[in-house]
Image (tube, rainbow, N blue to C red):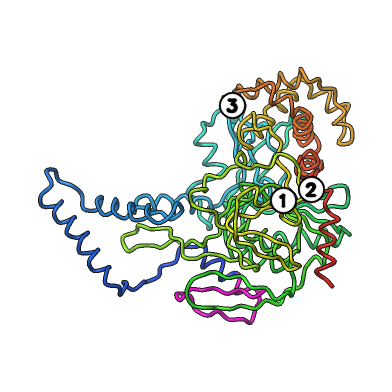
Amino acid sequence: MRIIIHSSTRRALPRQSHRLPFLALAVCTATSILVVYPVSSGTDMPVSLAKLERVLGIIQTSYVDRVSLDKLTDGAIEGIMDQLDPYSYYETKSTHSGSVAARDAKQKLSTGMQAWWNDGTLEVWSVEPYGTAGHAGLLPGDEIRTLNGRPAAEYVDEEVDELLNPPNLSADAAAATVTLSIKRHHEKLEKTFTLHYDSWKASTPAIGCVIDDSIGCIRFDDFHLGTSYEVEYLLKQYKDWGIKKFVLDLRLNNGGYLGAAFLLADELVGRKEMTIQVIPNTDRAYQSSHEDILNGASLIVLVGPQSASAAEIFAGILQDEDRAVIVGLPTYGKSLVMRDEALSDGSSMMLITGRCYLPSGRFLQRSYRARSYTAEGVPFRTELDNMNHSHDREFVPSDSVYHTLHGRSVYGRQGVIPDIIIPEMPTLALGSETTSNNIFYQCAEQIIKERGEEIAKQYSPETIYSLPLSNESLMKFLRIAAKHHNTLFDDSKVSKDLTRIRSVVLTKIARRFFERFEWRARLLESDHTFTLAKKHFDEAKAFALAMNR
C-alpha cells in the first residue's frame, strides 16, 4: 500500500521497516503533538487581531463590572472553534488537565476487574478479558467473600475500588497483590485468587471465537497501536487451524489511530499498488511490502452506524479493493484527521488537520448538518443485495461516483454503504446495548438464584439450551431486572425478540457454570446480522479469487 501524507509539519520517515511508517502515522494522527505554526502572512490577520485586542481593551477599561481577561480569552477561543466544524473544540487549562488525568488513570496498574454491591452482596461486575483477573478465571457475577483476609462486608465502595484499581499505584509497585475469595452459585466451595497489578489500557483488545468449526470471528471496538498485532495473531491462529472463512465485527468500533487502520488493511489487501491520501499540503509517500496474511481466504466485515472514523476508513479500503464483503448498515460518516494541539498555558485545542481519501478517491465525510445520523434514519427496512450499490442513492443522493478495483460503483460523502444491507433487529426496547446487557446479566442471576442447584446437577454446555424456561417466566425475570436498572419495559417490543433474548440469557447462565464454555460463539450464533451475513461467503470468496488472479 502506498500512503501519501500531505502535511508540511511532518518529517520524512525511514523506510527500512514497513511497519514504521504506519505506526509513525498512527502517532502523528492521534496523539498530542506540540507544533509551532507561523502567523499567517495574509493582510486580514493583523486587522482581525487588532480588532480583537481593541474589544478586550475596551471591556477591561470601560465595562461596568470587573471581568477576568483569561475567561474572556477562553470564551473568544471557544467561539472561534464553534465557527469551524462540529468536531474541533477547545479545552481550558483546567479542563484539559482533567482530560489528561482521566486518560492517565486508565493507563495505571490494575487487576482489570470491577465490583459492585448488589442487594448487600459484593459481586464482580466486569472483567477485562486480558487483565490479570480475566487470566485468573474470575467471572462476572462471582460473589466476593473476602478481600485480603477481611470480610467483604467490612469494606465501603471506595476501599474496594482502591484495592482492585488503586489510583496511585506506580509501576514500581507492580509486585503488589490483592487476595480475594469468591463463591459461585453452583459451587459449594469458595475459590481463592491472588491477583497482581498490571497495566490495564483503556483500549479494548481484539476478541475472537470460532463458529461452526469453520468461521473465525474477531471483534475489536477501537483502533489502538496494538490492534493490527492482536488481530493478525488471531487470524493466523485460526488459519493454522484450517479456518478459511473470517468475519471482522466493527459495529461498535468508534475509530482511533488512523495508522493502525492503514496497517491492518495493508495486511489483508496484500501487495497491491494502492494509494491513500491525507490532504492538504506536501506529499510524503510510503511503500509497504506486506502479503495478504489470509492468502485470499473469504472475508466479511460487519459495520453499522457506530462504526466511525478509522473503523469506516478501514472498511472503506477493503471495499474499494474488493477484498471483503461489507455487511450491515451505513457507517457514521467521518473521514477526518484530528490532532490535539497543546498551547503554552496548558490549554489545548483539538483541530481537524486533514481529510482522508480512500483508494478509489472518495471522501466518506457526511455533511456536518447530517452528523446526528442514527440507525433510525436509515431508509432500508429489509435485507438488500447492494453489491453493485444501486441502492446507495436511496440513502443519500450523491453525484460523487467512484469505482472499486474491479469496477463496482461506490459513492462518496455518505460513510460506507454496505454491499449487503441488513437492518438491525427492532429491539432496543430495553435501552442501549450496555443497559440491555446489564439487564440480561441481572435476569440470568435471578434465574440462577432460583434454579442454580438444578442447573449444576442436570445440565452441561451441550444441554443448557434445553433448560425449560417459559415465556412467562422469562418475561417476569426481565421485568425485575429492568426495574432494578430503572428501565421502562415494553412488553410488546420485548416479546418480538424473546427467542434471541432467551438464547443470550441462557448463554450468560452457562458462562457462570461452565468455565470452558465458548460463550462468545453462542452470543454470535443468536446475532441477527451475523446470522444473515453468513449467507454471503460465496460473494466474499469471489472477491478473494478475483484478487489473486
Determine which of the numbered discs, if any, sits on residue 377 in the image.
none
Q: Amino acid at mark 3?
A: His
Q: Closer to the N terminus: mark 2 or mark 3? A: 3
Q: Is residue 175 visible?
A: no
Question: Residue 456: percent from the left, percent from the top?
Answer: 83, 28
Q: Name the residue rendered at 32%, 64% in the picture.
A: 344
User: Comparing marks 3 and 1, which lies closer to the viewer?
Assistant: 1
Q: Amino acid at mark 2?
A: Ala
Q: Quadrant of residue 389?
A: bottom right
Q: Secondary structure at mark 2?
A: helix
**Which span is picked out in magenta?**
1-22
**Does 5 lie within the magenta span?**
yes
Question: Residue 14: percent from the left, percent from the top?
Answer: 58, 81
Q: Name the residue rendered at 78%, 52% in the picture.
A: 217
Q: Closer to the N terminus: mark 3 or mark 1? A: 1
Estimate the spatial distance between the alpha carbons at disc 2 and disc 1, rounded to whole Å.
8 Å
Instruction: Determine which residue is flagged by label 3.
Output: 485
Residue contact at pointers 2 and 1, CB within 8 angstroms: yes
Question: Residue 309: percent from the left, percent from the top?
Answer: 57, 56
Magenta stretch: dominant secondary structure:
loop
Q: Quadrant of residue 244?
A: bottom right
